[in-house]
Every structure is written in C-alpha cells, then in structure tokens.
Image: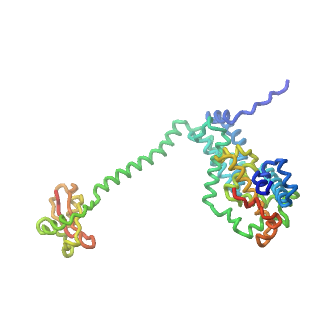
C-alpha cells in the first residue's frame, strides 16, 4: 500500500486495522496518524467542554414571552395582522404598474426616422407649425427631429401656443420640432 | 407501589400541543433543543451574542403559524438546525473576513499554537482553546463538518442530511478539515521545506486535494 492509498482510505476517520500495516512500514505516515489521533482527542475535549454551553436564561424568558403573546392573540387576529402585512406589497406593486402605464402613455414618443416627414414639416413650417416663443432660429431640416407627443392643452398654453380656454385638462396629440440640441422649436397640433 | 416513570414525549407531540397553545410544551421543546442550536451557532461563529441571536430567531420562527415545518419531511430538530445554519451562514457572509482573517494573519496564526508541539500538547493538557479558535478560523464548509461531526458528534449520515450533500462529501471535507487544523496548529518553521513537511516526507495528506 502506498502512502497515497493509505490516506485515501481516510484512516483518521474510520480506524481499520488492515490500514495499520502501512504505518508499521512507513514512519512519516505513522507520525501523521498519531497527530491525527491527537487532534481527534483534542476535538473530543472541545466537544465535551462545549456540551456545557447553554443559551442564556434571559433568552428563554424572551421566547416564552413571545410565545405567550402569540398564544393570547386569536388566530383570526393573527391572520388579519399577517394579511395587513402581506397586502400592501402587491397593492403597491399594482399601483406602481398603473402609474408607470399612465406615465408611459403620456411620454414623448419618438417617431421612427422619417426624413421625408421632417422635410415636409419643415417645408410647411410657416403653415402648420407654431414657433415657440423662446425658441431660437428654426433648425435646418438636416438637424431637425420630429417627435409626436400627447400633452394637456394647459401645457400648450404655457408654451405660448394659443388654445381655447375650455377643456384645458384634455390631452391633445401634437408634433414637436426639435432643434439641433434637442430644444423644441415649434409645435403642431394634430387634433 | 412504584411511581410511574413519565414517558418522554416526542418532539412532534410537543409541537402539536404547543400549536394548541400549551406553553409548557413549548418550554419543554425549547429546553430540549436550544443547547445544540446555540452550541452550533457559537462554534460556527465564535461569538456568544451571535449564537444567542440565532437561537432566538430559530425559536421565534417555530412560534409563527407559518413556520413551514412539515412532520412528514423529517425531524423537528433537523428542521430547526437548518434554520440555524441559514442564519449562521448569512451572518458569516455579512461578516466575511472577520474570522477567516485569522488564517491570513501570522500573529493570530501564532496564537493558535501553544508551545513547541501543540498537537502533542492536546494529548496531555487543556490546550484546547487554540484548537477551538483554529476551528472557527476554518473556511465555513470545513468548519461546518467539524462542528457537526466532531463537536456535536453527529454521524456522517445525519451531517449529510443537514448539509444536503452526500456522505462521501462529508467524509472528504472532514478529512480536509482535519488536515487544515493540523496545519494551523503546527508552529511555523520558516520555509515549507522545514519541519513537518520534511519530517513527513513528500506525501502530506493535509495538502491532498479532495
């Protein structure tokens, strides 16, 4: 038996008399096995000392108090309390989802790049687009981008676009002409 | 007429009574199971405060209606050990390095040894304090098997069930853990060519790959 075969049998874990033949022939393995046995004895001492370890008495008092509180609470009340804790999570998630959907609906939606549309819009700028009051010079057709948005009529008022005063909360669909730096230059109401 | 010896109630019976609101059943269960759970956490972390927290969390989990224990799937003690193990591992992950630094720190390594031949000293004196610290400084997968098999004296089958691994893995980890412990307990002798390595020849089982 080689040293490798000897240790592969894990002689320190399960004593097998057949393995001891090797230790009679191999002094280093005999020494090592003795060390392993000493370690095993030391571990048993640690285990014996550890057996005296107990959780502090104060812990028993705390958990027994917790048990009493739990036992005194009617099952229905416990269920209600759990449900009170459980419900807010899915409800909050649902509300967040609804808010995201509503917000998404009103987000500016970039149109697919349609150079012809931009060119056409630019060509009809005087006719259809209303220049925004604070906008600089109108963008050149090469630099312009057109986006379609839904916005409240009241927002159009703040942009300086003349709209009827009734139904200012109503949403209208509009196209915004963006300049080179992404700044809105002009707006065209679609509906 | 001799007094009747009370029959020891099973954990399952105590649990059923406890769930019906019997405080004495809970106290009996607590007193029966707190020791091994507290010791396991203490030996894994080396800290009494952590062990107390772990034991508390385990029994608070048992109190809850939705603790999730299913009698048909195994012993209550094993289930609670499983909770304790998860809590301990979570603690060790959060405090990664706090114990394993002992391995890297040569000063701490020296403090694990207690004389010219600390391994031999284990046979003759109470030099087990260094050994306990050496156990805590083991990587956690090796520490677990030493704590369960050597310190809590579970057999390999029980340890394998708790750890969710084959018995062969428990044995190989234990073999490797014992080798690591011997390395930690050996006094440093300068180079690897010195001391034990030279003494033991080319084959050093503590360094075998398992």
Q: Which quarter of the rendering shows the N terminus of chain A?
A: bottom right
User: Seen in the image, is A124 located left or right of residue B149?
Assistant: left
Q: Nearer the viewer, residue A21 or A94?
A: A21
Vertically, is A144 above or below B19?
below
Q: Nearer the viewer, residue A189 or A64?
A: A189
Display coloring: rainbow
Among the 4 quarters of the image, the one containing residue B138? bottom right
**Figure disc tally:** 0
Residue drawn at x 68%, y 59% as measured from the top left: B139
x, y percent for residue B161? 66, 44
User: Seen in the image, is A15 located left or right of residue A92?
Assistant: right
x, y percent for residue A170? 21, 55
Residue at the far bottom: name it. Answer: A137
User: Seen in the image, is A175 located left or right of residue B79?
Assistant: left
Q: Which quarter of the rendering shows the C terminus of chain A?
A: bottom left
Among the 4 quarters of the image, the one containing residue B186? bottom right
């Amino acid at each position: 038996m080689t040293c490798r075969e000897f240790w592969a049998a894990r002689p320190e874990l399960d004593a097998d008399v057949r393995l001891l033949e090797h230790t009679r022939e191999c002094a280093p393995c005999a020494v090592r096995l003795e060390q392993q046995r000493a370690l095993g004895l030391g571990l048993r001492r640690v285990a014996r000392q550890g057996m005296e370890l107990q959780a502090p008495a104060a812990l028993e008092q705390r958990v027994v108090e917790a048990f009493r509180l739990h036992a005194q609470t009617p099952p229905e009340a416990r269920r209600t309390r759990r449900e009170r804790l459980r419900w807010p999570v899915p409800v909050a998630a649902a509300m967040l989802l609804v808010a995201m959907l509503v917000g998404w609906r009103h987000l500016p939606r970039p149109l697919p790049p349609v150079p012809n549309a931009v060119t056409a819009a630019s060509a009809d700028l005087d006719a259809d687009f209303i220049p925004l009051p604070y906008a600089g010079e109108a963008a050149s057709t090469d630099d312009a981008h057109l986006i379609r948005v839904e916005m409240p009529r009241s927002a159009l008022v703040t942009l300086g676009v003349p709209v009827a005063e009734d139904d200012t909360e109503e949403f209208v669909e509009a196209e915004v002409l963006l300049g080179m730096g992404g700044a809105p230059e002009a707006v065209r109401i679609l509906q | 007429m001799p007094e009747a010896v009370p029959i020891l109630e099973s954990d399952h019976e105590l649990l059923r009574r406890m769930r019906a609101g019997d405080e004495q059943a809970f106290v009996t269960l607590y007193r029966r199971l707190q020791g091994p759970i507290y010791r396991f956490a203490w030996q894994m972390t080396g800290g009494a405060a952590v062990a107390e927290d772990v034991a508390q969390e385990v029994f608070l989990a048992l109190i809850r209606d939705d603790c999730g224990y299913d009698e048909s799937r195994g012993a209550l003690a094993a289930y609670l050990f499983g909770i304790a193990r998860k809590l301990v591992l979570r603690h060790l992950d959060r405090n990664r390095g706090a114990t394993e630094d002992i391995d890297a720190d040569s000063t701490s390594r020296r403090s694990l040894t207690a004389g010219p031949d600390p391994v031999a000293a284990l046979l003759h004196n109470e030099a087990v304090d260094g050994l306990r610290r050496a156990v805590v400084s083991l990587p956690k997968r090796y520490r677990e098997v030493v704590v369960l098999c050597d310190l809590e004296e579970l057999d390999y089958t029980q340890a394998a069930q708790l750890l969710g691994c084959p018995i062969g893995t428990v044995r190989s980890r234990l073999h490797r853990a014992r080798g690591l412990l011997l390395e930690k307990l050996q006094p440093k002798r300068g180079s690897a060519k010195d001391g034990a390595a030279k003494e033991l020849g080319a084959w050093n089982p503590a360094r075998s790959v398992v």
